[in-house]
Amino acid sequence: MFGVKQLVESGFCSKSLPSKYVFSRNDDDGSVVGNQDELAKVIPTIDFSLLTSGNPDQRSKVVNNLGNACRDWGFFMVINHGVSQDLMDGVVKASEDFFDLKEEEKRQYTGKTLFDPIRWGTSFNVRVDKTLFWRDYLKVHVHPQFNAPTNPIGFSETLKEYCKICREVASELLKGISESLGLEKSYINRKMKIESGLSHQLLVINLYPPCPQPELAMGLPPHTDHGLLTLLMQNQLCGLQVLHNGKWVPVNPLPYSFLVNTGDHMEILTNGKYKSVVHQALVNSKATRISIGTAHGPSLDTIVSPVEELVNSEADHLDPPAYRGILYREYLELQQSNQLNGKSCLDHVRIL
Ligand SMILES: O=C(O)CCC(=O)C(=O)O
Ligand SMILES: [Fe+2]
């Protein structure tokens, strides 16, 4: 298998993009890069420290902002989250070092199936991708069982520390989100078996090498994430776009912030009150972009369906269930074994 990094380093495609990477953009869906008004809109910012400060007034304001952000955007930037800049830099550096390992060493992680604990690969799913994406990746199941490549030295320790603190941030955000829905604070964490330490966490490191014709290629095509919440950070290079009101909005996060988005399971759980958000990653010709995401979900053996409190057919202001329940493990398999295609995976569970 040739990853994009190896392709670039071989000098084989220094001027033009090999045809199998030419991505046909769907211009018919009305989604064009946002105009100036759209770009002027900043994505919502959540000050995490105010959520955990112990001041009830501050907390209720942030809970309110969190609810609005989930409902109106499905995407927000989290600042003052308590993850140190050193640790964030350390994860980026360790990720670069991993991708710099010799091909033979990385090849031992060429995963065969989704539930291989560590998978190194390219594009999204080379078995079904019609176009290849300009992206190499490392995917690691890091919770409830922690896994990590043994090299580079120190990678495993750095990842372990980082993933643990991300779980803590995600769990606090889920408490705030529960409250924003009028549910008891620990509702989601309890129902999803996150409280009992069984949450599933997948770490995804994306590497997008410089591309000779970035306007023709695609890093990651329009898709939603599978879990409840994804926490994303990057090496200060932009490329992420979010679909908001039918327009692509480029996201320029503050340095050392987290970009958080709601995933398909948040949509299922909340019966569509908080929808998963479509996003894509573009590539550039200048430098290697790295993004690091942790997808936070319930335990793999949880059947997720809309929460009863949000679907009460007797109360006329609530909608009937719009999604059938599905085992989290089964959903993950569905998503990862098909092509990445907008919100199509949710069609498997949508009640029409
Ligand atoms: O690279 C990015 O900014 C987005 C990555 C992403 O959407 C993903 O890994 O699911
Ligand atoms: Fe994503």
Image (cartoon, rainbow, N blue to C red):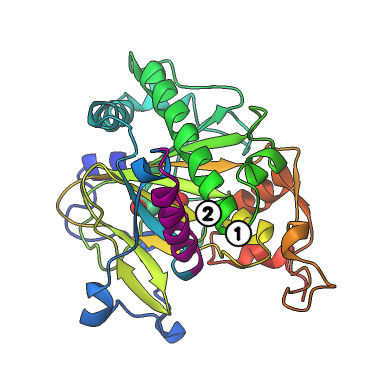
Horizontal and vertical percent for residue 253? 26, 54
Magenta residues, start to end = 54-71
Quadrant location, the C terminus: bottom right
| Viewer-nearest residue: 334 or 105 | 334
| Viewer-nearest residue: 131 or 48 | 48
Quadrant housing residue 285 = bottom left
Badge 1 marks a residue whose secondary structure is loop
Horizontal and vertical percent for residue 73? 44, 67
What secondary structure predominates along the stretch shown in magenta? helix
Badge 2 marks a residue whose secondary structure is loop
Quadrant housing residue 217 = bottom left
| Viewer-nearest residue: 53 or 307 | 53
Residue 184 in sight from this viewpoint: yes
Could you tell me if the residues under marks 2 and 1 are in contact, i.e. CB atoms within 8 Å? no
Looking at the image, which residue is at 63% across and 50% down? 337
Amino acid at the residue labelled 1: Leu
Report if residue 43 lies within the magenta region.
Answer: no
Amino acid at the residue labelled 2: Asp
Is the distance from the Cβ of mark 2 to the nearest ligand 2 atom less than 8 Å?
yes
Q: Which residue is mark 2?
A: 225
